[in-house]
Image (cartoon, coloured by chain):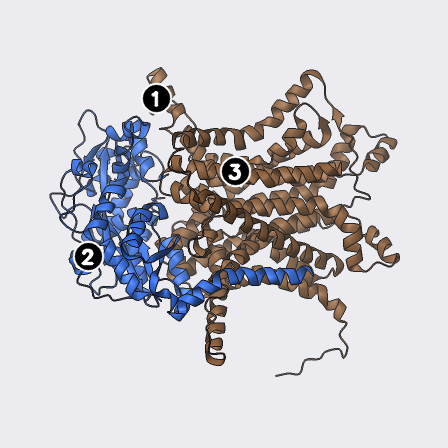
Amino acid sequence: MAPIMLPLRVDASRLIWPACALLVALLVVLPILTLLKLSLSADPQIWQHLRTTVLADYVSTTAILVIGVAILSLVLGVASAIAISQFRFIGASILSWALLLPLASPAYITAYSYTGLLDVSGPIQSQLRAVFGWQVGDYWFPAIRSLPGAIFVLGCVLYPYVYLLARTALSEQSVNLSYAAASSGANRRQFFFRVSIPLARPAIVAGLALVIMETLADYGAVSYFGLSTFTTGIFRTWFGLDSVESAAQLSLMLLSLVVLLMILEKAARRRAAYFSQSPSREDNRITLHGWRQWLAMALTCIPLVLGFVVPMAQLLFWAVQRIDGIWQARFWELLSNTLSLAGITAGITLALALLISYAARFSPNRFTRLCRSISSLGYAIPGLVIAVGVLIPLAWFDNQLDAWARLHLNTSTGLLLSGSLVALVVAYIARFLALGVNNAEAGLARIHPSMEQSARSLGENSFGVIRRVHMPLLRNSILTGFILVFVDVMKELPATLVLRPFNFDTLAVRAYELAGDERLADAALPSLAIVAAGLIPVILLTRFMRSDN
Amino acid sequence: MKRAAFFVLLLSLAACQADPQGAQRDGTASAGEVNIYSARKEALMAPLLNEFTQQTGIKVNLISGKADALLSRIQSEGANSPADVLLTTDAGRLHRAKAAGVLKAINSSELNRIPARYRDPDQQWFGLSLRARLILLNDPANTISIDSYEALADPAYQGQICIRSSSNIYNQSLTASLLHHSGEQATLEWAKGLVANLARSPQGGDTDQIRAAAAGACSIAVANSYYLARLLGDDPETDDFAAASKIRIVWPNQSGRGTHVNISGAGVLTNAPNPENAIKLIEFLASDSAQQIYAERNFEYPVIAGIELHPVLTGFGEFKADTIALNILGEKNAEALKLMDQAGWK
């Protein structure tokens, strides 16, 4: 081996941040490497088959879906964020948190709900036929289980990511800026479009990135709608063609698409760096009066009604029909499993997200930035694929450790990690780290480096800066990230199904067990329970944020 | 501090589960347990498993999930896998598990009661319940005379057929059986003809096809027997019961090879820590009392002859089943899916 030249003394403190960044990124790198290894042994004939038959369809359907969902969630999310952050009107304080509610419901449950309502055999179309004496085919009705239907459903449940990040960014903007703008002769509208929106852009884009990745990884809703997207293709290849290797290949292709998008976004943003001098909590919203405030309320209600009220009403209707027989004693066990798993995972994920975001800030070089970018990739990988990517290396490690322990210690360690909740938590972290990182980033981006420079000049070290300067300013961003991870873990299904220990159920598992068995009505109650449990953190989040004002 | 807390947390998480498994590995505390990886929904298995525990005192531990994901888990867990039994909802996946080398041969006179064509020739897996793939008609005028799967591709039925996505295993198995009986070219033509006859792009599950047919979106639907039976076993006041009542059943290919059937089944895993209990469990599932539960609670056909059917199933009448060896469905699955891809069956 060639001798490696090392400087005699390595400044350990310089290596701490890159090392932290690497460790966190490894959680995502590990499953991706597993996919790479799998895909190396993929049968080229299957690839050939996919390329000549279905791949073009996967790509085009996925592209249209992503663009459609991105536009819809951008419109709904940004419009409602502007309404809430800029205006004071009747119901605004309730709407400010209620607009987050669609997040509490798994996308596939909302898809089932809308299908139950709007499908050809649903109540609306049945009534139309009964009242007007029509037959199917005599009248036009939008097909819910279609590409536009999927765009509608996913857009309605995912817009809160954009809303949440955009609202936080818009309402934390410094009032000083608006004074400065006013003194230079800009009116409020000019200020808003020339200063506020550009300042909120990183946050809006971060929210949009989450929407896009979640859309790319969605399986439940698109497969129920019968769409040929990348995700359905991945599972079709794995289950139907019996080739987990080719499925890994498809997953990596999806991933490279995401990487490309990230590079494009970074390139577009390169020249612009936005910092807020002193984030302020001062309330300078415009108070609306008379019909204006009713109109504002009605318009701001639209996303909430489409994403939450309508699908939940359908679920409630089903749940009432089936209330007996489902409500079992195990409900509390399911609830506590779900909440504790979500709480633990969200806590760890946010700690890791902060760690890697700080590494990239305090030790700003290519390596830490790369680690940080990689750590976001997991969100675009379908849960089941992540699960396998985590399971294979962990089980390998367990078996090696077990063999070693048997040989040297005469004891068996069994499946230490892969047989326990550790595997599940690791998979969740790998999948949801992006939620934490994007929020931590969006928060950090609004803190100008001059603040830490002055803190440092006053004798604070990195940790002092974090604790005394950043934490108070970042609190909302951290909480937002925590809640998002929490809610996403509560809803997560495919990885939970395959990685959980024996007899360990969550609400999402129970809901799926019934819904997947085509018993939608029976699935309504556990689904409502997920939503109800999801309300708790959303309300807590609002409390925390409001206590600041 | 934060990191120390993190490691404590990780370790305690590991400890939560590591202990019971360690105990199972020792073989001392394992006498009373059996561990199942199940592709069947827990709710469907629960009545059977509760009965098993009552009869034998053996505690049942269960993880339910997608068959291929569970198989992946078994393979990566390797020698330390806690799984004793793999339960699946189709023969293809059992064949896949056998091909992966994770199942072991079982010699049991009890299990030999299962007809030979519903179990593996090497005794590695056993069928436990049957479902038939039916053609269902909403045809009040009684004008449709379809009598075989092949006829689904007849241009006479253009725009009339509802069937779910080809991503579904039931459609893959049906196509695999056609591939076996009529060969590649004929099956590709058939799939193309079927796609040309679709009333709408494939969507939803089997139940959705029945509902769509009842609503008039199509006059011909394809679905598994128990989905229709379950709707007919529902409360007569419900919309679903009303929908299912409009449906007329066709048993396909009765004048030829018989109707396509598939099994749900089970196998014992090579590295099972509790192999005796695993065998006991499968023997129980093949026993008369368990077979009765399959028929009554899940609206499935028992694999053991002489078990009384659910009245709804009795109402469906007698039928002749295709006698194709079920492992062929697994062997030809990938090839079948490729043909479906080529035919544009989404």
- Look at mark 2 in the image and give the residue it sits on: B325
Q: CA–CA distance between discs 1 and 2?
A: 46 Å
Label 1 packing within 10 angstroms: few (<14), some (14-19), many (20+): few
- Look at mark 3 in the image and give the residue it sits on: A531
Q: Chain of mark 2?
A: B
Total count of labels:
3
Tell whether B343 sits left or right of B3: left
Provide residue A272's location: percent of width, then percent of height: 75, 47
Q: CA–CA distance between discs 3 and 2?
A: 46 Å
Kindly indicate which chain is depicted in blue in the rendered structure: B
Task: Indicate the amino acid at tag 2.
Answer: Ala
Q: Chain of mark 1?
A: A
Label 2 packing within 10 angstroms: few (<14), some (14-19), many (20+): some
Res. A29 image quadrant:
bottom right
Task: Indicate the amino acid at tag 3.
Answer: Val
Q: Chain of mark 3?
A: A
Res. B27 image quadrant:
bottom left
Q: Nearer the viewer, residue A223 or B131?
A: B131
Q: Residue A138: which disc?
A: 1
